[in-house]
Image: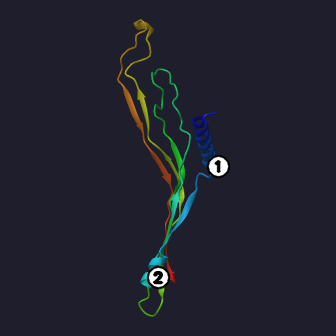
Amino acid sequence: MKSTTRGTLAAVITGVAAAVGAAATPAAAAISVPVPLDGLSMALGTEVPKASLEVPVLMAGAPDGPRYVAGRLMPEHTLPQVPFTGNLPGAHLRTPLPRVLGDGSDHAGVDAPGTDLRTLAPGVNLDAPLTPPNPDNFGMPNLKLPEAAVAAPVLQAVPGLVLSSGPGL
């Protein structure tokens, strides 16, 4: 077997393994990433905000493909809508608030948990300016107005936010 054939075969196997691995991961996965501010705290000699952000992982679904409709030359859903599922990214922020009287500090916090996200990409429906063959017109198609429609994108999510304050960081 040639080295180019082996390389191509290895690339195909790697792609299939990646696709299978991606299909095995949960659709609503998110990776939490802390923002490193400890060095700034040591350099300034004071408390700094603490932050943690989530990075969403979007997964593409199978589109509802084109299908034939009687009386049209072009199929319905010429460019189908592609569904995506995942999470809206979450954020967790806490910042110190110095006390006006006395030593120490309080905190103010914002927690925006990640939430499920469902989207559909825009799609296109087209039809040609001709009808199917007309037997009354010796098999020739008739003219008609062309048709074009854009299927609107869809975004569904229920985001939330929690504000908090209290003693300490």
Q: Which residue is mark 1?
A: 24
Please name the amino acid that badge 1 sits on.
Ala
Q: Is residue 143 visible?
A: yes
Q: Position of residue 79 (x, y in %)?
A: 46, 34
**Disc 2 element:** helix
Instruction: State which quadrant residue 61 falls in.
Output: top right
Other-residue count near label 2 (Cα within 10 Å), few / some / many at <14 / 14–19 / ≥20: few
Q: Position of residue 152 (x, y in %)?
A: 43, 42
Q: Position of residue 127 (x, y in %)?
A: 41, 26
User: Looking at the image, what colour scheme do you see?
Assistant: rainbow
Please name the amino acid that badge 2 sits on.
Met
Residue at 59% x, 35% y: name it. 5
Q: Which residue is mark 2?
A: 42
Cα distance in 3D space between marks 2 and 1 = 42 Å
**Disc 1 element:** helix
Other-residue count near label 1 (Cα within 10 Å), few / some / many at <14 / 14–19 / ≥20: few
Dot 2 and dot 1 residues touching (CB under 8 Å): no
Q: Is residue 47 visible?
A: no
